[in-house]
Amino acid sequence: MKLNARVSAVRILERLDKNNTFIASELKNEFDRHSNIDPRDRGLTTELVYGVLRQQRRLDYILRPLIKGRYNRLDLDARILLRLGAYQVLFLDRIPKPICVSATQDAARAMRKGRMTGLLNAVLRRVDPDKNSLPSDKSVKAISIRASMPEWIVEALVEAYGMENCESEAMALRERAPTTIRPNVKKGTKDTVREALSREGFSCDDGPNGCLIVTGPGDPFSSDCFKKGGFVPQDPSSLAVVDALGDVEGKSVLDLCSGRGIKATALAARGAQVTCVDIVEAKLEQSKKLASRLGVRSNMRFVTGDPTQENLGLTSYDHVLVDAPCTGLGTLRRHPETAWRRKKEDIFRLGKIQKSLVESGAKYLKEGGVLTYAVCTFTRFEGELTVPSTMESVGDDISTRPSSGWDAFQMRRFRRIE
């Protein structure tokens, strides 16, 4: 079946609205359903999905007055088609406006939504980048429209960085994230990966914390180098957390929220013996597959369960890593869908879980052992922790802003003293 980029984009956006899935997995599933995809269609589908989600509030602000009060009552697929068409008109200069409108109508017909074509034509022909202005004041509401995100996220940025820096940090979260990878040191060096990807048409520049920034045509995660375990996707901020543990050769590490094993496999590749704990067994199964592909499975043990509620038979460790569940707002460049799923109350709900995980993790430290706490978000409530009574702070707190060019994160470290 031939892929229709706009229809596929609408279907993916519908699923993302209804399900707790990620863009990357939905794109992969969609592309797997089609054979012989034209790279241009693949690229357009990806552009439309990410673009609509990055600009969703801004698009809604422009579209709402064009529907005369009916916008919120429209069906989900109608709103998505309108956003899709408006995004093309406002942001894809290479496509003439009449084509943007007619192609969106064609997508509606292909979806058996032909009744919507009149609405699409009437509204989209009135979308004009030169006439549909945005608010220009410095209020939280105006910034949230210009930066296209919920107001409570802008308020969190104000609390974290001040009103004078809020808009620049918000706009940084709307930029496209570069493709960054971690070379697998078990199978080669950065230069090994660079040379292998170069043979497949990609370029690699050095990035922070030992990562490589990949550019070029196509998908590097379809390359032979990737399939053979030469590298994994990882942001420099994530690698900074791994680096913070220092020399882990021969050390025991408890990764208390291991997830899919990105940090755990990095530690195992550096010679650590890593015990991976996660409450979701499916994530640990993915971690096992990743560990096998990277050649570090023998350095890893996997335990399913909730360490705050259960006795999991864990011992004591040189290091405990609490890469805690968080709002994930520091990763909005890579996961713009997060902005529309999270709620303000999640900050405080997850903050309680984070505190409980740190308290549990402290129990598994050897005397003199170090606990590293990290969250990929910028909210102050999630980054500020009371030092447990059995521990002392180690070094300075570390954080990065969205404007750093990488994922925003916060990290604190504690040493057990009794």
Image (cartoon, helix red, strand yellow):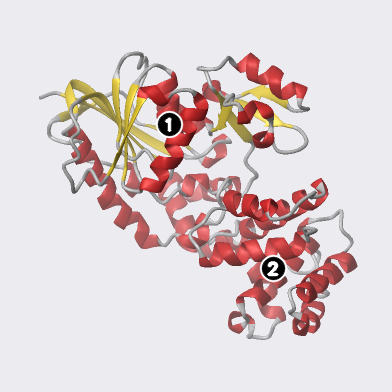
In this image, 281 relative to 358: left or right? Answer: right
Element type at mark 1? helix
Cα distance between the residues tagged 1 and 2:
36 Å
In this image, 253 relative to 182: left or right? Answer: left
The N terminus: image quadrant:
bottom right
Circle 1: is it few (<14), some (14-19), or many (20+) Cα within 10 Å?
A: some
Residue identified by numbered label 1: 263
Residue 184 x %, y %:
53, 22
Residue 14 x %, y %:
60, 67
Q: Can residue 263 be seen in this view?
A: yes
Residue 29 x %, y %:
62, 53
Quarter-of-image position of residue 275: top left
Marks 1 and 2: CB-CB under 8 Å? no
The answer to which of marks 1 and 2 sits earlier in the sequence is 2
Residue identified by numbered label 2: 83
x 48%, y 61%: residue = 341
Q: What residue type is labelled 2?
A: Arg
Q: In this view, does 33 lie above or below 393?
A: below
